[in-house]
Every structure is written in C-alpha cells, then in structure tokens.
Amino acid sequence: MPDAASVPLDVQFDETDASLGLAPSNFSELYGLTSDMEPILMRHRPYDAPNQEFRLETHSIRKVLQSDQGMEYPLTFHVVHDSKAIGYQLLQSEHDNIEACVAPHGPRLMDLFWRIMHPSFPILHRQGFVQKYAQSYQSVSAPLLGAMYLIALGWWDYDRELSNRSMPDATSLRKLILQAIQNSYHRPKLASIEAMILLLQCKPEDPLNPDHTWNWGCTGQLICIGQALGLHLDASSWSIPDWEKRLRKRLSWAIYMQDKWTALAHGRPSLITDDEWMVVDLDISDFESYTSEDGEVRVDSLSGAVRVVQMVQLTRILSDVMRTFYTLRASKNQDTSYLYSQAMPLLGLLDAWHKNLPKSLQMNYEAISRLCPNGYLSLAFYIVRITILRRLIRSTALEPLCLDVDILTHTRTLAHETAQEAITFVSRLRPDHLEAFWYFASPFGFSLVGSFTTLLLVTSRSEPEKTLWRENLNRYLWTLRLMSKACGPMKYAVNRLEGAILKGMEHALSINLDDLFMVAASPLDLTFANTFDSFENLANLDLSNFDWLSAQP
C-alpha cells in the first residue's frame, strides 16, 4: 500500500496543529444557542492561547469563532478527553477484531480503497489517514478502518493476489463495524462521520430485504452526530487548521446528500432544512491535492472532485423538487396545470445542469484500464427528472381533471422522452461502468426507471402506446437481468421490480415475468401518438382515460 511519502500532500497533517474534530485524544461537541451554556456568558471567560481554550479539571471550552454569525457572542465547543467517554476501554479490541477479520489482507484492501473507491468519492482526509495507518492500524479510527475494508471487498478481484484467495466474511466485518460506530458516538469525531457515510454506501447484504428503516435510522444518527460536531455550520472562518475546514465542508455536503437521496428513495421527509443549514457551496478547492509532487494532474482525482461537486449541485435541485412537490402539504395539490407551472423552471435548471456537465463526467468518456464511476451521476440526473414528471403524470389520474390540451400533451411528451432516454442509458452501460462505484441511491434509481415505465403503461391512452410501454418494460427487465451479474444495484432493481412493484399486476399489464427470455432483439418503433387532439371533446374525458386499469373489473 502507499506510504505517507508517496502521497501528494497539499498540507502535511500534524496532530499538533489544533484539530477540533480529529484531535488524537479529545472529542468536542457544539454548545447550541438554547443550551444552558448561555452564549452571552461565553464572552467573559479567559480563553488561553494558542487554541483559545478555557480549561477546567473535567473538560475545557474552546472558542472557534469570536462572533457567531456576526453576533456579539462566540461560537464554542465542549472538549473532553476520550478516556472519560463510555466504551473507551473497548478501543483496543475493536481495532484488533476488525483487523483480524481481514488479516492478512488489510494493506492490500486499503490499496484497493485508495485506488478505486477514493477517486470515485473523495470525501476522506487521505493525508492524515495514510500517515497514521503507515504507523499501525491501531493508530486510525476503528470504525473508519472497518468501513474502508468492507467497501473495498467489492473490488476484491481487482487485486492479483487477492483474487486467488478466499474473501473475508463480510457479514462478520459489518457487525464489528456497526458495534465500533455505535461506540464511537460516545466520543464523536469526524472519523465517525466518515465511517458511517462509507458504510451507507455499501450494498445491502440481502437485496430482497435491504433494511430501509435501518438505513433511514442510520442517516438520522449521521445527521445528529454531524450537528453535534457543527457540520451544519460554515466553518470557513473558524480557528481550526485549513485541512480540517476543507474536510468539514466535504463531510457536511456528504451528509446533506445522504439525507436528500435517502428521503427520496424511502419516501420519507428530509431531515435537513434550509433554515438549519449554513454550509457554503462546495468547489474543487475544498478537496485535497489532485496534482502529483512533480506538478502533473492526476485525472482520476480531479474528476472525482468535480464529480462530487456536480452531485452536490444536482442534490440541491433535488431538494427543491422534494420541497415543491412531495412535502405532506404540497402532495395534496393535484392541480396538473399548477404543478406544470412549478415543474418547468425546475426542469430548466436540471437540463442546464446536464448540458454543462464536464466532458470527463459524461458517459462516453473512457479512461484506459480504469473503472468509470460516471454512471451514478447520470443515473441521478434521470432520477430527479423522473421524480418531477411522475408527479405530473400522477396528477392527471386524480381530481381535478386537467382539460388543458397543451399541458397534457407536453407533459406526456416529456415523460415519454425521459423514460426512453433513461432506458437507453441503462442499456448502453459498459463493463467499466457496471463494475465501478455506484452511489448508494443507484439501486433505487434503476428500480424507479422500471416503475416510471409501468406508470406510463398504466396511464396510456391508446393501444399503440400501451404496446410501446409494455415492450419497453419487458426489454428493460431483460436488460437488468443480463447486467445484474456484474452490477449489484441492478440485481436489487430487478428483484424489486419483479418481486414487489409488478407482482400482482402481470395479468392486467399483459407481461410475463417468467418468460422475459422470450423478448425479441429486434428494435422497437419508438413513436406513438401521444398528443391530445385539439378537436377532441374534452368534456367526455374522465379519470379512467388516465388509468385504464381502474376501469377494469
């Protein structure tokens, strides 16, 4: 594995440089505005240099900002020695048990992580970790160590030596990581956040029972611990090292994305609101160096930074979509014309984002002898677009009935184009896409494409259109089956579609989930009459025109 000297450092990591969130033997927790530690009183304590701490026998109070949000009171943290936290005595055994679970392959798994996973999703503080790990595995955070090992197991066959050996027991490793993470919450540090974010990226052990409630609960814990560490705040002016400011910003936005995409995938209310979010926008300057010591740009590292920045921007649009259409109050409005007026600006923002995507992040980009993780970003684009359009299509099958020909026609056309593009996108994925890193929400995305196609089938207004979407659905399921052997997220999607979403509707939809291998390979005629005739007597329309299954006995 790489040692500290081989890693390009923009700032050498040093534990003596006054870290707040990764101190070697202390942990810190934010004093909030409504706690019994009144912020006005905090102005009058004698804070000592160099770290602006007021020390007591049991703890200390650290001031990181003289004026909190411009107010005449400081921003402070409660700082305590690790040994005073519950579970401190378990630290040694946690490290040893996790390392023993993968021994003697730890260093090679770590090399796989830095080679494949980190460039795809570069949110960790690589410099500090590599220097510590070179000393001993016991020098790094136990839950983070385990999470890095676990996610690296996904590329076990990409190491020549490991590919010829038996893989460690992932189930046992996962249990050890969960225990270590829960224990670490008694002394919260940024490494706890890093570990949980990585763990939530790992594929579920059972695709048919992905444990959604547990994932949502872990996301809630992640947000809570992040708030205790001040990750919902802008740390750019704090009295902490520059590397920690950048790390905090990356982790803050990783938490934000985890919240929004988990809320979308599981149909839950987002836990992060704009009123409680002060973190400034992410840019590539917030990432660790993507140049080698001789000044050469490492393309995979630069692309990884840009990819995360683009994903954050897309998630901001998703947040607006969720707030506009899917809160409890917003979801009660089924006026298609009104929803259409709200959707068009959001679709414009989304299309502008997609149009301006850098070439290195587009699907036709190929890197020699490297996996390409661009797939999850493009899939996320289709997820957001479908999330907007499914709301419009859904409203057409509900009261009040929309009689605006132009809106109905344009909505249907947009939905048709989006579904076709998404299906084509999936069918054109290359092996280097399929085996690369996929963001945790990707399985939901592959499933959503099939669910949206089914919605268009059910709301079809003509036999040619029904035939089109029925054939598209069959072909899409067949594509997922073919590709699922090389792509875990697709395995989840095909199991979800065939085992839950479509189950019980096969007869009505005229599809046979057991005979998809019979689907012909000939191309489809992708055209159909999706317009509403302006001379049609719209007074004769009723809701059954927008859900033909509802009219069946």
Image (cartoon, rainbow, N blue to C red):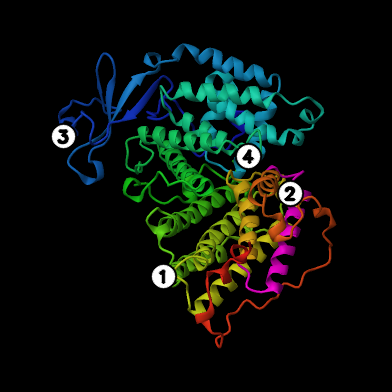
Q: Which residue is mark 4?
A: 117
Q: Is residue 428 visible?
A: no
The answer to the question of whether label 1 and label 2 lie on touching residues, with beta carbons closer than 8 A, is: no
Q: Nearer the viewer, mark 3 or mark 1?
A: 1
Based on the displayed image, in which of its 4 quarters is residue 234 positioned?
Answer: top left
What is the magenta range? Answer: 459-488
**Residue 115 visible in the shown view:** yes
Disc number placed over residue 40 in the picture, else none: 3
Question: Which residue in the protein does label 2 denote?
Answer: 432
- Residue 105 location (% of width, % of height): 70, 23
Looking at the rendered structure, the secondary structure element under dot 2 is helix
Which amino acid does the dot numbered 1 rest on?
A: Tyr
Q: Are marks 3 and 1 in contact (CB under 8 Å)?
A: no
**Which disc, if any, is residue 338?**
1
Between 402 and 422, the one lying in front of the other is 402
Amino acid type at image mark 4:
Met
Residue displayed at 52% across by 66% down: 397
- Which comes sooner in the sequence, label 1 or label 4? 4
- Give left or right: position of 39 versus 103: left
Element under disc 4: helix
Q: Residue furthest bottom?
A: 535
Task: Between label 1 and label 4, give the one nearer the viewer.
Answer: 1
Identified by mark 3, the residue type is Ile
Q: Are marks 4 and 2 in contact (CB under 8 Å)?
A: no
